Image (spheres, grey):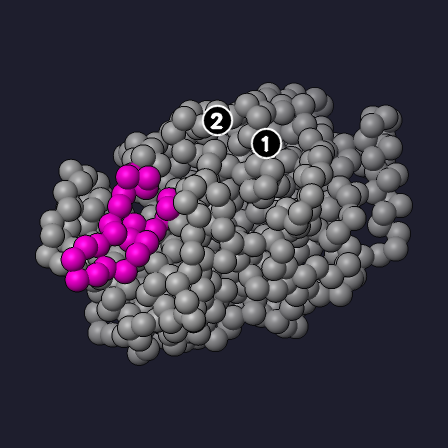
Amino acid sequence: MHSAPSEFKMAPAANTPVNVLNPFGDNKVTSRTSKSFKRSQPSLSLLRPLIAVVGLALASSCSLSLAAQTPASTSLTVHWDKPTVLSKSTPTLQIVVNPLTIPGSSIHDGAYGAVKELGAEYVRYVPWLPYPKWAVAELEPPTATKTSWDFSLIDPQTKDFFDATQGHNGILNFSTIPTWMFKTDKPVPYPADPAQPVWNYTQGTQPLDPTGKQIGDYYARLVSWYTKGGFTDELGVRHESGHHYSIPVWEVLNEVDFEHNMTPEQYTIIYDAIVTAIHKVSPETKFMGMALAAPSAAPKFFEYFLNPKNHKPGVPLDYISYHYYAIPSVHSTINEWQYSFFEQADGFLNTVRFAELTRKRLSPATKVDLDELGVISADDLTQDQPGHVTQPIPPAYWNLAGAMYAYLYIELAKQQIDIVGESQLVGYPTQFPSVTMIDWTNGKPNARFQVLRLLKENFHPGDQLVETALPSTLAGADFAAQAFQTKQGKRLLLVNKRNLIVDVPLPSGSESATAVAVDVQSGEEPARSVKIVDGKITLAPFAVTVVSW
């Protein structure tokens, strides 16, 4: 989740280098809730724009492929008998509440229908800060005679989530704390219109109750509304809901390194208070902590929060979560994005490696959910400026962003990350259109969603990754491949990172294999069938392909 785009300060860099020596320091990771945005200085070669232009010309003419200059005997090599690591990774997505996700919107049925059909585990549901009336159940502090508890606007969307994910494990995160629970100079206003966004609702850095109990009690009542049929408020009045849902996982707040600018110490106190209070009313619920916006800048959060000594006895550390978005620089185009998205992703993967060392040292049983992975365009970060006009998004962008997610899935499966969450179901002009997985004009899943569908249908926790080597003519910087031994059979995941047509010579014995791909030609439809000819498969620009035996 992300807040006021005007709060970001963009450097005019076309790329972000991978900082191998200091992966917790300068790799670009960001969020829409940050107060400022810092990124590394440019590292893009001056030749890359020229290379990209030439690549586009080659792709459009289809007159040359990378493998055309390669000896036929040079092929991608898979050693099915040489396992490397057992995957724990579940591909999934998050749903963020906004006006187009509410019942009655023009794309509501298409969006939630896609979620239900997908049937993914660990879908994340987040009512969030720009829409206080859809996210906060007690907008005013209680008085001696009344409270302000009101779920009338919150329930319809939350019910949609429960219905769409029925039979699957879901993650709930009502991330926005009532601002009156923090010390502020004056009461923080919010719009009367629930659909009008407000980007400065989460004010204050010091809770009125520094023990966190007041905040914990609020969340216990909220959870009771959905799991116990209702709750008793601060004045002893019973509020009946009739809801008896199960909440498998509750994520405690969102991007706390930016929202209310919490320190690791402060957040840990609040986390313990919320978990203790919710556990009393929903003892079967697991808990997820941190949800960091900028993990590369927060090594202390990992060190402090993951240390059980810093928590109250008995408070579980079931999961941690954190986020990553690639952000292209202002005025760059898809010619540069094909490089910068993946270079920034590699920087984030370095952060994950260091975070994993900390987790395994301090709390090895804690699982990991990377529940916001995606791209935010530079244009989106200025969308609240007066007179802003959303710039057109090239169709191939959706494939490029999907290819980056597929690449992250491969690399995170290698690191045995438990949940790999793509962000987000619905965006649209004025609400981060570059992040959407649903076409806001017709309610159909776009290529980003179709890539998730392809991964979900073919890869699961328990799959065995096996040794996979690229042919010498396909550079790892331009192309990714990983073979999996799955319960359904042998699978090979191919990702074309570039705006080029690529011929991939497959391992011997591939004549009988089948293949499907999400690419520009498949558009907003599920993966299309592609042919394997003479032991080779042709990948369109930014194609994500699965070969099956």
Q: Is residue 306 visible?
A: no
Q: Residue at x 45, y 28 (%)?
A: 105
Label 1: which residue?
447
Left or right, residue 438 beside residue 54: left
- Please provide percent x and percent y for residue 413: 50, 50
Name the secondary structure under disc 2.
loop
Q: Using a 10 Å C-alpha cutoff, classify the residue at mark 1 as few (fewer than 14 neighbours), some (14 to 19) or many (20 or more).
A: many
Left or right, residue 533 beside residue 242: right
Q: Residue at x 55, y 30 (%)?
A: 440
* Number of the front mark, 2 or 1: 2
Q: Is residue 391 visible?
A: yes
**Up-down relation of residue 389 to residue 117 (above or below):** below
Label 2: which residue?
107
**Up-down relation of residue 62 to residue 210 (above or below):** above
Q: Residue at x 37, y 44 (%)?
A: 134
- Please provide percent x and percent y for residue 143: 21, 61
State which quadrant residue 344 falls in: bottom right
The furthest residue to the bottom: 309
Mark 1: amino acid: Ala
- Please provide percent x and percent y for residue 227: 19, 45
Q: Which badge, 2 or 1, is on the more N-terminal residue?
A: 2
What residue range appears in magenta? 133-155
**Up-down relation of residue 26 to residue 238 (above or below):** below
Name the secondary structure under disc 1.
helix
Give 413 or 326, whichever is nearer the viewer: 326
As measured in the structure, the alpha-carbon distance from the residue carrying label 2 to the one carrying label 1 is 17 Å
Left or right, residue 2 beside residue 281: right
Mark 2: amino acid: Ile
Residue 535 belongs to the span the image colors magenta: no
State which quadrant residue 160 falls in: top left
Q: Main secondary structure of the magenta part?
A: loop
